[in-house]
Amino acid sequence: MTGLVLAGSFEARNICDKLSFEKIPAIASLAGETKKPVKLPLKTHIGGFGGVDGFKKFIQNEKIQWVINATHPFAANMRRTSTKICNELNIKHLLINRPEWKPEKSDNWHYINNFIDLDDIIPAKANVFVGTGKNTLNQYHNMSGRKLLCRVIDKPEIRFPFESGRYLIGQPPFSIQEEIALFEKYNIDWIVAKNSGGSGGFSKILAARMLNIPVVLLNRPRLPSSYKAENVDEAFQWLRKLI
């Protein structure tokens, strides 16, 4: 039974490592958003599938019999699409849904469903660390008066969309000490991040906690109806019932 792992998260890398080690036939897929993605130990498809029809053809041509969607928790379109297609083709489908971050008593966290709410939360003239990715920058159009710092992996091909902002190039992972030094260097007053959960980006949240910096967290999009697992072990429990 050949499977497909929709990758793009640290869980996906661990799943691919385990599939390779156990010699379970599978193909990985990466969206191709970064120029030098981490190499996976499986045959890897990089880039889109060419829409819904292209995705269906890929699954049929490769004789895919199960799909583990281990994309980022905020990859809403791919999560909805893979669930819909697998239901239509009667293919077993699993969503990896790691637990969200939870605040401690000392944390000053604010939650939003839409970036437009930032204007009511973050005061004017604040220095803001944008931890939601460069693809969300167009959502910050109502943040005039604030200085924005957005960290990206690859050097952007276009200028920063706002005058009062700049890109910072960096390759994750980042330690807590590195995040503290960064926030202190740029006098960061507020941090905006997606409530992604997991350990990958949590160092910036821990650094904010240690520096008493308030954090605004974007709530996750609603998940489609599908089997779900919180971690790699649960995913393999599901998989072993199939193969």
Image (spheres, helix red, strand yellow):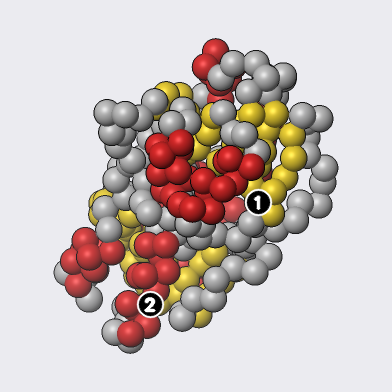
- Give, as a three-letter code, the residue at label 1: Val
Q: CA distance from mark 2 to mark 1?
A: 26 Å
- Residue at (38%, 77%) from the top-left corner? 17
Q: In the figure, 183 relative to 157: above or below?
A: above
Quadrant position of the N terminus in the picture: bottom left
Regarding residue 168, the answer to whether it shows in the image is yes
Check disc 1 and report the residue beneath it. Answer: 152
- Residue at (59%, 68%) from the top-left corner? 37
Q: Nearer the viewer, residue 220 or 167?
A: 167
Residues at circles 2 and 1 in contact by the CB criterion of under 8 Å = no
In this rendering, position of residue 115 left or right of residue 235: right
Across and down, in percent, residue 146 comes to 68, 23
- Residue at (68%, 33%) from the top-left corner? 148
In this rendering, position of residue 105 left or right of residue 202: left
Quadrant in which residue 104 is drawn = top left
- Residue at (40%, 37%) from the top-left corner? 209
Across and down, in percent, residue 178 comes to 53, 53
Quadrant position of the C terminus in the picture: bottom left
In this rendering, position of residue 180 left or right of residue 124: left
Check disc 2 and report the residue beneath it. Answer: 17
Q: Nearer the viewer, residue 179 or 87?
A: 179
Q: Which mark is residue 93?
A: none
Regarding residue 218, the answer to whether it shows in the image is no
- Give, as a three-letter code, the residue at label 2: Asp
Q: In the figure, 99 relative to 222: above or below?
A: below
